[in-house]
Amino acid sequence: MPLQVREYSWQQTDGTVHLSLPLPGVRPATAHIFCTENYLKVNFSPFIFEVFLYAPIDDINSKAKVGDGAILFTLYKKTAAMWETLSMANVDKETMQRIREESIIRAQEKAKELSEAKATAKREDQNYALRVMMKWLLKQAEARRATNADIPEMCDMKEEEKNPEWLRDKGNQMFAMENYLAAINAYNLAIQLNKEIPTLYLNRAACHLKLKNLHKAIEDSSKALDLLTPPVADNASGRAKAHVRRGTAFCQLELYVEGLQDYEAALKIDPSNKIVEQDAENIRRIIQGSEL
């Protein structure tokens, strides 16, 4: 039989209630909070605390901070007014049970509404992504036409221009001008001429990151790593860049564990890189937060 907690303290303003609930000898992580607009319950075995609130609260925006041997609640009143007491007066057992059951039903309905809202938002995101992709394809076609004068087809190219390094430099110029589609076209032509130059894939991966072509960025970074073998001092910089670019793409796809693995690989190559070190720490925090 749970032990009912009677000791707590509370204060209020016209718009909020501040409730402090001690956790005697209990690990904060074990406390389970259930809150609706007129009912609050906290289970922290072997104790239980529940209160049938004097008036409705905004249970969506109300907050609970757990730690330091107590839970501190900030409850936002739906109607600005001073309460006579924290809980309803003269509540009989039948009313208590009815409020508990209604609270569970309301919580289930809200959870269903949130789930449906997330599904709708996901569909809207997918539709938006499709529109963006169609727009991207149109821009890519325009870029091909616009860059024909700068990067002609193979058959129209001068002999000195049929050089992957010349095309790589052209792509680098386009990248510096933030014309990422044209840069990709240059790297594509260079790769057609020579598929064994790691920097072409590495630079194209950077373009794909800018354009949010994340799967392509992963593919090109992986290809660059395949070519940057065996791992020696001369290709250390390229390998580190490839890991960071692939890790960035993974993280933008919310594949944080895979992304962290690449950042850690980059740090093994270049342990003094403080920016990569900080980014890796930020990814760890995201992973730890998602596991709570």
Image: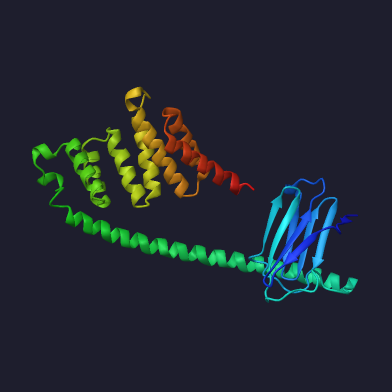
Location of residue 108 (image quadrant):
bottom right
Residue occupying the point 31% across, 39% down: 201
Q: Report the front residue among 55 and 254.
A: 55
Left of 197 or right of it: where is 243? Answer: right
Percent x, y for residue 284?
54, 41
Left of 209 or right of it: where is 17? Answer: right
Percent x, y for residue 129?
41, 61
- Above or below, comparing residue 41 to residue 84 in the picture: above
Location of residue 27 (image quadrant):
top right
Percent x, y for residue 80?
67, 76
Residue occupying the point 60% across, 64% down: 115
Percent x, y for residue 261?
49, 36
Left of 88 or right of it: where is 213? Answer: left
- Above or below, comparing residue 147 to residue 244 in the picture: below
Left of 97 or right of it: where is 187? Answer: left
- Above or below, comparing residue 157 to residue 57 in the picture: above
Colour treatment of the image: rainbow
Q: Report the front residue among 274 and 259.
A: 274
